[in-house]
Image: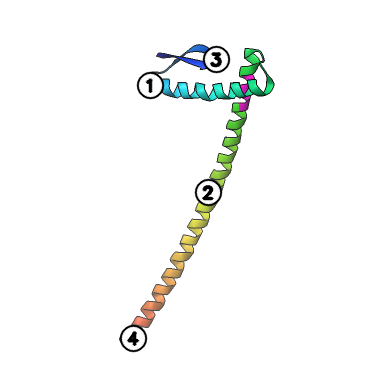
Amino acid sequence: MSQVTIEVNGRPYVVGCEDGQEGHLTELARLFDRQVRQVSQEVGQLGETRLFLMGALLLADELADVRMRMAHAQSELARLQSDAARLESRAAVALDAAARKVEAIAAKVAR
């Protein structure tokens, strides 16, 4: 297990993580730090716990919004895939009918 020193709102924190995850953890900390600093600028300096809570709630709200948009996108994708399958089936039926007509015309011409 590795330890990484991250900085949030100007204060260092030592955090443990799995080996190889240091860069990811550092990037997550930067994201959280930006959120906390934004809250601090908008609301003023609250206590650290409340400041962190507000930052976490705002990130959770963003996550919920992204999950909802992703669910809508997945639903739309499923609808489009179903439409594509239906169109593919109709195209296959049309091609089959056209092939039969071509074969019938070829049989008449061959006589």
Please name the residue that numbered disc 2 is placed on.
78
For the residues labelled 2 and 1, the Cα–Cα distance comes to 36 Å
Q: Which residues are magenta?
A: 53-58
- Camera-near label (3 vs 4) is 3
The image position of residue 75, as x and y in percent, is 56, 46
Direction bottom: furthest residue: 111
Q: Which of marks 1 and 2 precedes in the sequence?
A: 1
Tag 2 and tag 1, C-beta contact below 8 Å? no
Q: Looking at the rendering, in which quadrant would you find the C terminus?
A: bottom left
Please name the residue that numbered disc 4 is placed on.
109
Give the residue type that dot 4 points to.
Val
**Vertical arrangement, residue 27 with respect to residue 84, above or below:** above
Please tell me which residue is depicted at 54% across the width and 17% down the height of the picture.
8
Depth check: 44 or 74 in front?
44
Give the residue type that dot 3 points to.
Gly
- Camera-near label (3 vs 2) is 3
Give the residue type that dot 2 points to.
Ala
Please tell me which residue is depicted at 48% across the width and 57% down the height of the picture.
85
Magenta-span inclusion, residue 54: yes
Magenta-span inclusion, residue 19: no
Please name the residue that numbered disc 3 is placed on.
10
For the residues labelled 4 and 1, the Cα–Cα distance comes to 73 Å
The secondary element bearing badge 1 is classed as: loop
Q: Looking at the rendering, in which quadrant would you find the N terminus?
A: top left
Please name the residue that numbered disc 1 is placed on.
20
